[in-house]
Image: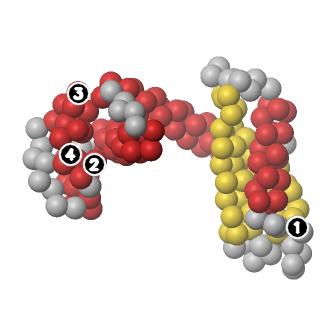
Amino acid sequence: MHVLWQCHATNDVWSEAIKAVQKWRVGEGDLLGLLEELVKKLTQAKMEETIAIMRGLWLRRNTFVFENKLLSHNNVIRAAIDSLEEYQTTNVQMTENRSRAEGLDQKWKPPNVNCLKANWDAALDVKLRRVGLGVIIRNNKGEVMATGCDSKSYVEQPAIAEGWALSKAMELCKDLSFNRVILEGDA
């Protein structure tokens, strides 16, 4: 709570960031109470921006503690906004992909007993040349055993994007010592 809201070192970030929170008192006692107040007073867009900046402040703190570098308030704000925009873009693309997949009337089929199934997918942004990767591993009852996600830059072709997603699925299975796994993508 202190690093995100009360610390004097974070005042420079909040003074340059969201106008709606600049003049708030810094005396909120706990994070949950602060978040409840934010939800009451901010629009969803401003709430998302505030949370992204809080994440940026935490990363700034870690960079200072572990690397002895203090990032400027402008860097924190810019990185937070960039990260939020990337998340929103990916989220829109994932929703569009999900809508198309639902139109295919596909249904997940469980693996045999003593087997797992790893489903993987990729969302490619050709314009930004970035791909988001997702993996979910379930048992024969449909229970989630593990998940993973990643992103890669400089990817332009859908087949390469799907290949990265498959690679992520295999890497996750190997890291967790899952040996009897069916790998299933949508491509």
Badge 1 density bin: few <14, some 14–19, many ≥20, Cα 10 Å: few
Front residue of 16/99: it is 16
Residue to which mark 2 is pinned: 3
In terms of secondary structure, where does tag 4 sit?
A: loop
Q: Disc 1 and disc 2: Cα gap in Å?
A: 43 Å
Q: Disc 3 and disc 2: Cα gap in Å?
A: 16 Å
Disc number placed over residue 7 in the picture, else none:
4
Residue to which mark 1 is pinned: 179
Q: Nearer the viewer, mark 1 or mark 2?
A: 2
**Pointer 1 or 4: first along the chain:** 4
Q: Disc 1 and disc 3: Cα gap in Å?
A: 51 Å
Q: Nearer the viewer, mark 4 or mark 3?
A: 4
Which x, y percent locates residue 41?
19, 47
Query: Amino acid type of disc 3?
Result: Glu
Name the side, left or right, on which 91 lies relative to 157.
left
- Give the quarter of the image for residue 68: top left
Which x, y percent locates residue 23?
11, 38
- Give the quarter of the image for residue 43: top left
Front residue of 67/22: it is 67
Query: Amino acid type of disc 1?
Result: Asn
Given contact means CB atoms under 8 Å apart, are the residues at marks 4 and 2 in contact? Answer: yes
**Pointer 3 or 2: first along the chain:** 2
Front residue of 125/67: it is 67
Quarter of the C terminus within the rendering: top right
